[in-house]
Image: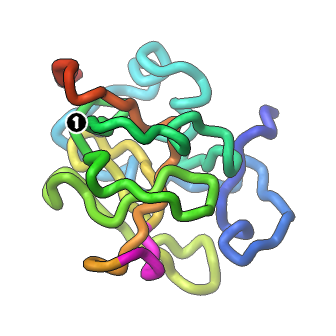
Amino acid sequence: MNRRFFCNALGFFGVGATLPLTACSAGASKKKFPLQLSEAEWRKLLPYDRFQVLRNDATEPSGSSALNKEENAGTYTCAGCNLPLFSSVNKYDSGTGWPSFWQPLHADNIGTTKDFKLILPRTEYHCARCGGHQGHIFDDGPRPTGKRYCNNGLALKFVPEDEALPDLV
Ligand SMILES: [Zn+2]
């Protein structure tokens, strides 16, 4: 088993313990989304690490994404289907080790589910087009929304503002 990826359940409480990837249940990925690909098609399309996050709700290790330090102007698209999800305008350094945003680019491009992997329910969010898991929403973000969209860097691609957005998958 590849143990680089774990549910972020216990991490929410700051506990160093980990759950194996197999303990992560795919909630959002079971629903119907505009873009429907089979598991085999997703595996062909995505590198292993992106597949684990997007399709299996895994969480990358804190501080592992180069996007944490990305400060250029541009758009963050879903790494599964290229749908634009966030703008650099709404990105901030949350100090958590995951790329963080205080609001999505378009509310319609994000879908949410209640995640009961912990005792307290959390709000999971995903790409509204392909259902790819992105992260969780917390209420400790900066003004004006007070929200923190805590995103896996592996679930995003950064497109600098002087480059054309990629075609949707
Ligand atoms: Zn997507």
Q: Nearer the viewer, residue 90 or 120?
A: 90
**Does the residue tagged 1 have its C-beta within 8 Å of any atom of ligand 1?**
yes
| Quarter of the figure that contains the N terminus | top right
Q: Residue at horizontal 53%, vertical 30%?
A: 50
The x, y position of residue 45, in whole percent, is: 41, 16
Q: Is residue 41 left or right of residue 107?
A: right
Q: Residue at horizontal 22%, vertical 36%?
A: 83
Q: Which residues are magenta?
A: 137-142
Picture quadrant of residue 145: bottom left
Farthest residue, direction front? 72
Picture quadrant of residue 139: bottom left
Q: Nearer the viewer, residue 31 or 156?
A: 156
The x, y position of residue 14, in whole percent, is: 76, 73
The x, y position of residue 69, in whole percent, is: 54, 41
Q: Residue at horizontal 85%, vertical 65%?
A: 16
Q: Quadrant of ligand 1?
A: top left
Main secondary structure of the magenta stretch: loop
Q: Is residue 97 left or right of residue 57?
A: right
The amino acid pointed to by label 1 is Leu
* Residue 18 shows up from this direction: yes
Q: Nearer the viewer, residue 96 or 5?
A: 96
Establish if 165 lies above or below 17: above
Q: Is residue 21 left or right of residue 169?
A: right
* Residue 55 shows up from this direction: no
Q: Secondary structure at mark 1?
A: loop
Instruction: Confirm whether the magenta stretch covers residue 147.
Output: no
- Please name the residue that numbered disc 1 is placed on: 83
The x, y position of residue 159, in whole percent, is: 30, 27
Dot 1 surroundings within 10 Å: few (below 14), some, or many (20 or more)?
Answer: many
Q: Residue at horizontal 85%, vertical 64%?
A: 17
| Quarter of the figure that contains the C terminus | top left
